[in-house]
Image: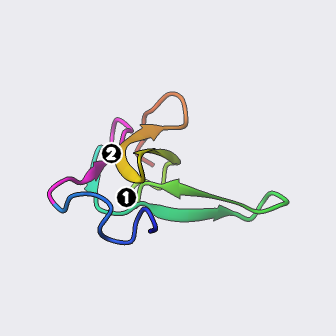
Amino acid sequence: MPLFGGHSHSHNDKMKCPYKGCEKPFDKPTVLTDHSSMPRQSYYACPFCMSKIDILTEKMQVVGVKAVDYPPTVFDS
């Protein structure tokens, strides 16, 4: 079963962006692809700030979200 097929985590539990300055809750991460590198690399990102995130799983269940970039802060543009 896919991790984000809609039923892998409780409907009451939302993931939360780990980056300071965003920290918004979401149901499902966005998948982004970096076209500037070869081979292309896809990764999970916050759907609001588009920052790269790691999805922490345990027994095929989402248990958390972790910041990948340091410092874990989103700056306004």
x and y, in percent, of residue 20 in the image = 34, 35
Which one is in front, 7 or 74? Answer: 7
Q: Residue 48, which numbered label? A: 1
Question: Dot 1 lies on which element?
Answer: loop
Which span of residues is magenta-colored? 12-21
In this view, which residue lies farthest toward the left? 12
Residue on which the image places disc 2: 22
Q: Toward which corner of the image does residue 39 lie, by quadrant?
A: bottom right
x and y, in percent, of residue 46 in the image = 42, 54
Which one is in front, 28 or 22? Answer: 28
**Separation (CA) of disc 1 from disc 2:** 8 Å
Which one is in front, 21 or 54? Answer: 54
Residue sitting at 58 percent across and 63 percent down?
32
Q: Is residue 16 left or right of residue 39?
A: left
Density class for disc 1 (Cα within 10 Å; few <14, some 14-19, many ≥20) is some
Question: Dot 2 lies on which element?
Answer: loop
Magenta segment includes 34: no
Residue sitting at 14 percent across and 57 percent down?
12
x and y, in percent, of residue 6 in the image = 32, 71
The quarter of the picture where the N terminus appears is: bottom left
Q: Toward which corner of the image does residue 21 lie, by quadrant?
A: top left
Which one is in front, 42 or 10? Answer: 10
Q: Amino acid at mark 1?
A: Phe
Q: Amino acid at mark 2?
A: Cys
Q: Are marks 1 and 2 in contact (CB under 8 Å)?
A: yes
x and y, in percent, of residue 2 in the image = 46, 67
Q: Does label 1 or label 2 sit earlier along the sequence?
A: 2
Q: Residue 58, which numbered label? A: none
In this view, which residue lies farthest toward the front? 59
